């Protein structure tokens, strides 16, 4: 495996651990991944829920929590630590400002196009800005905005395909379409990004995400031009993952038919593991009594069938019957909980084996 370079940051392995909220990837998992030579990522979604006793309100608790998680991660590793911040968050601005101030190495921003993200950088900031996109069109729109308004080119771009877990940047009818699959989209986005590379003289690594599970998957997608990969689902069933044992076990217990597409209150389709809570949602048996957090811009208490923050928090804590687990299309393939160290060894071994087999076939 070759190294991944994002500006002046160099990861020994081209593996970014996807940011997973609520609470699934905090400083524990992020630091463990960074220590193995990958890029560890803290999810900013709902951070205030764990730090309410440390602040006067949810917004202040989120800011305090993000500071604490970044500091905790940096105390545990000298590796690369990123933060995933959803554009759809009402406190997106606060979270970005906090990540920059705390000198997070990278900000990954998705669940909407982060068209004004560069404006939050300070004069001496070294934080790298990496948008998450789902199409060449979105790539062009974002690059045009960033270069024309801020004279800033993305430090890297994550291309998330429709096989990812959590919220998906596609219409439900497009999820199975060949046109939108990662392998089809990736070369188009690489080509679009190359226009800005040439114009501004800056390398833009393209990171592939969604449905990548094995070292063989990493090898194949990098042969299509990706500089690296982002993997979320594969890191859930590790000891260092910050979610509860019950959350992890739901992956191990899941069958392929249990991985379903849901309609999220956020207004986007999402991929999750089917359970009794989601079945009660379908039957219309759930409805939030109030909106305690005002966390998502696009969530409407009058029409939402449930509070997504409460549901994800419950699952994170282990009460999966009053919540649910987001998961990628390959979550059902999990059979055991292993360490992040052993997972890296496994991915590297799989990659090297497939690389050698391919070389032998060519010779």
Image (cartoon, rainbow, N blue to C red):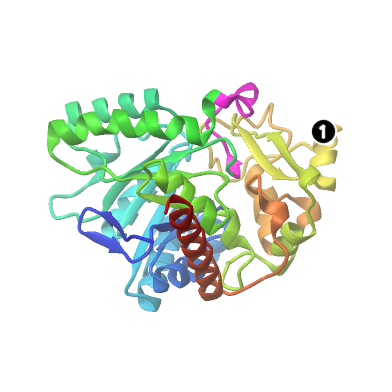
Give yes or no for residue 119 being in the magenta stretch.
Answer: no
- Residue at image location 31% in from the left, 50% down from the top: 97
The C terminus appears in which quarter of the rendering?
Answer: bottom left
Q: Position of residue 161 (x, y in %)?
A: 52, 37
Can you tell which quarter of the image residue 246 is in? bottom right
Q: Position of residue 249 (x, y in %)?
A: 75, 64
Check disc 1 and report its element: helix, strand or loop. Answer: helix
Count all numbered tags in the image, as a single digit: 1
- Residue at image location 40% in from the left, 68% down from the top: 34
| Residue where numbered disc 1 is placed | 282
**Foreground of the two, 308 or 73:** 73
Task: Give the vertical position of 24 relative to 212 (above or below).
Answer: below
The N terminus appears in which quarter of the rendering?
Answer: bottom left
Task: Give the vertical position of 6 relative to 144 (above or below).
Answer: below
- Residue at image location 51% in from the left, 75% down from the top: 341
Residue extending furthest front?
A: 363
**Foreground of the two, 39 or 334:** 334
Residue 226 shown left or right of residue 183 in the figure:
left
Task: Give the vertical position of 265 relative to 43 (above or below).
Answer: above
**Foreground of the two, 111 or 342:** 342
Residue 200 shown left or right of residue 353 in the figure:
left
Task: Give the vertical position of 291 relative to 236 (above or below).
Answer: above
Q: Position of residue 336 (x, y in %)?
A: 71, 69
- Residue at image location 47% in from the left, 53% down from the top: 358
Res. 48 in view: no
Mark 1 surroundings within 10 Å by alpha-carbon count, few (fewer than 14), some (14 through 19), many (20 or more)? few
Residue 228 shown left or right of residue 174 in the figure:
left
Can you tell which quarter of the image residue 264 is in? top right
Give yes or no for residue 177 being in the magenta stretch.
Answer: yes
Q: Which residues are magenta?
A: 165-178
**Foreground of the two, 320 or 328:** 328
């Amino acid at each position: 495996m070759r190294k991944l370079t994002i500006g002046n940051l160099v990861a020994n392995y081209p593996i970014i651990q996807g940011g997973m909220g609520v609470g699934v990837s905090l400083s524990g998992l992020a630091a463990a991944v960074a220590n193995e030579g990958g890029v560890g990522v803290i999810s900013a979604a709902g951070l205030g829920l764990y730090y309410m006793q440390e602040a006067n309100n949810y917004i202040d608790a989120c800011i305090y929590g993000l500071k604490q998680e970044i500091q905790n991660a940096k105390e545990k590793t000298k590796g690369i630590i990123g933060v995933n911040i959803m554009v759809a968050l009402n406190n997106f601005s606060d979270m970005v400002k906090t990540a920059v101030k705390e000198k997070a190495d990278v900000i990954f921003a998705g669940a909407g196009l982060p068209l004004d993200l560069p404006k939050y950088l300070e004069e001496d900031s070294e934080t790298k800005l990496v948008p998450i996109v789902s199409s060449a069109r979105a790539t062009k729109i974002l690059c045009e905005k960033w270069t024309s308004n801020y004279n800033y080119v993305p430090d890297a771009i994550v291309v998330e395909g429709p096989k990812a877990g959590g919220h998906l940047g596609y219409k439900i009818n497009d999820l199975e379409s060949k046109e939108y699959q990662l392998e089809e989209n990736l070369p188009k986005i690489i080509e679009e990004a190359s226009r800005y590379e040439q114009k501004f003289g800056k390398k833009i690594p393209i990171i592939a995400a969604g449905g990548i599970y094995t070292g063989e998957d990493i090898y194949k997608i990098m042969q299509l031009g990706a500089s690296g990969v982002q993997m979320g689902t594969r890191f859930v069933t590790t000891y260092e993952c910050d979610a509860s044992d019950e959350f992890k076990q739901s992956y191990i217990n899941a069958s392929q038919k249990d991985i379903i597409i849901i309609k999220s209150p956020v207004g986007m389709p999402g991929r999750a593991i089917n359970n009794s809570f989601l079945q009660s949602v379908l039957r219309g048996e759930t409805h939030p009594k109030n909106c305690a957090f005002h966390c998502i811009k696009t969530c409407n208490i009058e029409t939402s069938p449930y509070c997504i923050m409460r549901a994800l928090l419950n699952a994170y804590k282990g009460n999966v019957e009053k919540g649910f687990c987001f998961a990628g299309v390959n979550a059902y393939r999990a059979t055991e909980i292993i360490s992040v160290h052993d997972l890296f060894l496994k991915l590297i071994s799989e990659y090297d084996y497939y690389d050698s087999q391919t070389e032998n076939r060519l010779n």
